[in-house]
Image (spheres, rainbow, N blue to C red):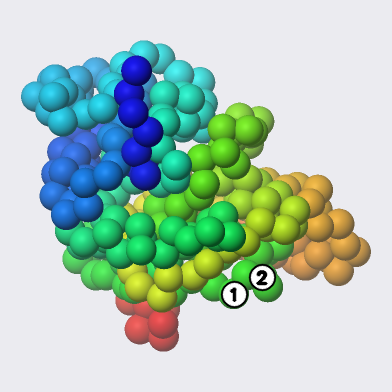
Amino acid sequence: MTSSKQVSVITINYNNAVGLTRTINSVLSQTFVDYEFVVVDGLSSDESISILEKFRSKISHCLIEKDQGIYDAMNKGINASCGEWIVFINSGDEFYSESTLDLVSRNMESGTDFLYGDVLVNYPNGMENLKKANSLDLFWRKLPFSHQTLYCRSEYLKNIGFNKNYEVCADFDFGLKNFVSGANFKHINKPLAIIEAGGKSEQGRFKIALEVKKISIKHVPSIFHNIYFYCFAISELFVDVLKQALPNQVIQSFTRYKNSLN
């Protein structure tokens, strides 16, 4: 039986061999050593499985089998883990530096249930943007931080896991539910992860807005929130239509301008 580690690093992968290699190298480069590494692959058809075989001796638990989507795979990773804290660094994601886990571990104090930080976003055109975590006062609107920067005590995820009924926002559902229930969240005012823009949660904005609304109203019912989300969903639908109609060059120019304001 595997002895308990302080941190379980869980990576989910499906047909992303290049990103998987980058993620594995980032995990293995950590100066902090009291962690286990769990990888769940959805039976990839690219070179991913060969890469996992290459690094098999460095991976604490490796599960290769079909799943029912990303949150089903993440739940499998949770069930296979035995660390005191859990963080998801999925395929293509990286720790911000070799000392990230060491930094976070020094903040794992008694009375703290969740730790989160800032994130560096890389864009396909070579741009990058350091995104600061938002105020927890706005948690009802969206996840205030990138999930790749979220570290939580394992009992929270072991108890309920992620709700597989949500396609892209189960992490928001999990976070908001625990925030409303009184769990203690602590911000580490440092970038903790590097992610690539254009992930699943950035596509189909109208559909995502409806899912966020459903989750938020469930946990924080409010007439004002209902009105806000109806307006927000309409604006996201408008953005979806514009993205379909406008040339990529125009969209990239707007992205550069928006990032310059942060």
Q: How crowded is mark 2: few (under 14 residues within 10 Å), some or many (20 or more)?
A: few
Q: Where is residue 99 in the image (x, y as percent from the top left)?
A: 21, 61
Q: What residue type is labelled 1?
A: Ser
Q: In which quarter of the image is residue 224?
A: bottom right
Q: In which quarter of the image is residue 195?
A: bottom left
**Outermost residue to the left:** 54
Q: Residue 21 or 208: which is nearer the viewer?
A: 21
Q: Residue 155 or 165: which is nearer the viewer?
A: 155
Q: Residue 245 or 96: which is nearer the viewer?
A: 96
**Outermost residue to the bottom:** 261
Name the residue carrying label 1.
135
Residue at coordinates 81% horizontally, 48% vertically from top-left? 218
**Outermost residue to the right:** 223
Instruction: Tell me the SS state at disc 1.
Output: loop
Residue at coordinates 36% horizontally, 44% vertically from top-left? 7
Residue at coordinates 48% horizontally, 25% vertically from top-left? 79
Q: Where is residue 11 in the image (x, y as percent from the top left)?
A: 33, 36
Residue at coordinates 65% horizontally, 64% vertically from top-left? 139
Q: Where is residue 43 in the image (x, y as percent from the top left)?
A: 31, 17
69 sits left or right of 166 in the view: left
30 sits left or right of 174 in the view: left
Name the residue carrying label 2.
138
Q: What is the distance, in whole Å, between disc 2 and disc 1 at their CAs?
A: 6 Å
**Quadrant including the C terminus:** bottom left
56 sits left or right of 225 in the view: left
**Quadrant including the N terminus:** top left
Q: Which amino acid does label 2 sit on?
A: Leu
Circles 2 and 1, Cβ within 8 Å, touching? The answer is yes
Q: Position of residue 96 (x, y in %)?
A: 25, 62
Q: Residue 176 or 169: which is nearer the viewer?
A: 176
Instruction: Tell me the SS state at disc 2.
Output: helix
